[in-house]
Image (tube, grey):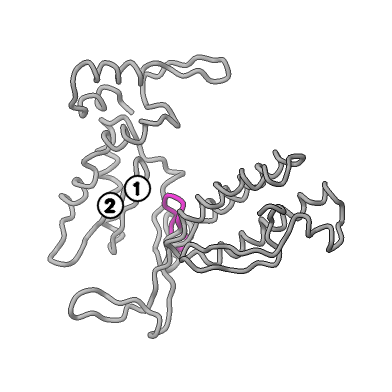
Amino acid sequence: MNHDYLLSKIHCPSSLKRDLKQWIKAGVLDNGVFEETETGTPQGGVISPILANIALLGMERLIKSLYPNKGTVTQANLIRYADDFVIISKDLGIIEQCKTAITKWLKPVGLEIKPEKTRICHTLKPIEYNGKTEEPGFDFIGFNIRQYPVGKYKTGKTGGAASRLIGHKTHIKPSHKAIKAHTEAIKGVIKQHKTAPQSALINHLNPIIRGWSNYYSAVVSTETFNKLDYIIWQMLRAWTVSRCGKASHEKLRNYFRHGTIKLSNGKERHENWLFQTKDG
């Protein structure tokens, strides 16, 4: 990211802008090696997403100015989260033109679209593009967005007074990449607490599991939750092997008990094998 371009878009007192300039040019120390930062913002920095929003402000207006709505019909829609964005349109030609326009718009910002992180695909069916088959659906900020063909009793409908059946349903689910990252995070915590008390392991796992579940609770996630529930149970069962070997039913009851789980929808679920201490 071009620092001069970024600073030109920030309207604040000169003293604050001076501090900000010193901060983004302070350099980074990685494994004892100092590197200057003439461009970009610190990866993982608390203010970096805000600076990305400031630098990229206007990208949505660009797309709307090129392809304004025609009455109630949307020609192109750009959805952005910091420096991640998707463009949705029914017209492949519009998608390609938007890509070209954004590539040109990003040059003075000091940014470019990375080919390895860019896909053009259909949300309902596979397509052939640039000599390769692109599977339907796309990932965005940890979610997978895809449409599935369904019968008339489950199909979605168009909006407006003259609504009609469209023959498919849009599903938003946790992406495979997000599921894998979550599973690896759980595995890492369990490994770090191989010899720790059960209560310590539970205290470290609960915020991770609860936070992830809350993030995905508003989308189609029941199947994913059930699958992860089983995977995590297997990991925890393996954790007990180091404590009591191939334990009998009685020994396992030192770690797994009857209990009740409160679900995000307010309901409760009774479990026969809940990973819980004697004190709950």
**Rendered image: mark on residue 200:** none
Residue, disc 2: 78
Residue, disc 1: 85
Q: Which of marks 1 and 2 is nearer the N terminus?
A: 2
Circle 2: residue type: Leu
The reply to whether discs 1 and 2 touch (Cβ–Cβ < 8 Å) is: yes
Task: Decide: few, some or many residues near mark 1? Use Cα within 10 Å; few <14, some 14-19, many ≥20.
Answer: some
The residue that appears at 49% across and 58% down in the rendered structure is 174
Q: Distance between the residues labelled 1 and 2?
A: 7 Å
Which quarter of the rendering shows the N terminus?
top left
Magenta residues? Answer: 134-143
The residue that appears at 76% across and 49% down in the rendered structure is 239
Q: Quadrant of residue 103?
A: top left
Task: Decide: few, some or many residues near mark 2? Use Cα within 10 Å; few <14, some 14-19, many ≥20.
Answer: some
The residue that appears at 66% across and 62% down in the rendered structure is 230
Residue 20 location in percent, x, y?
30, 20
Along the line of sight, the residue nearer the viewer: 47 or 160: 47
Residue 127 location in percent, x, y?
43, 64
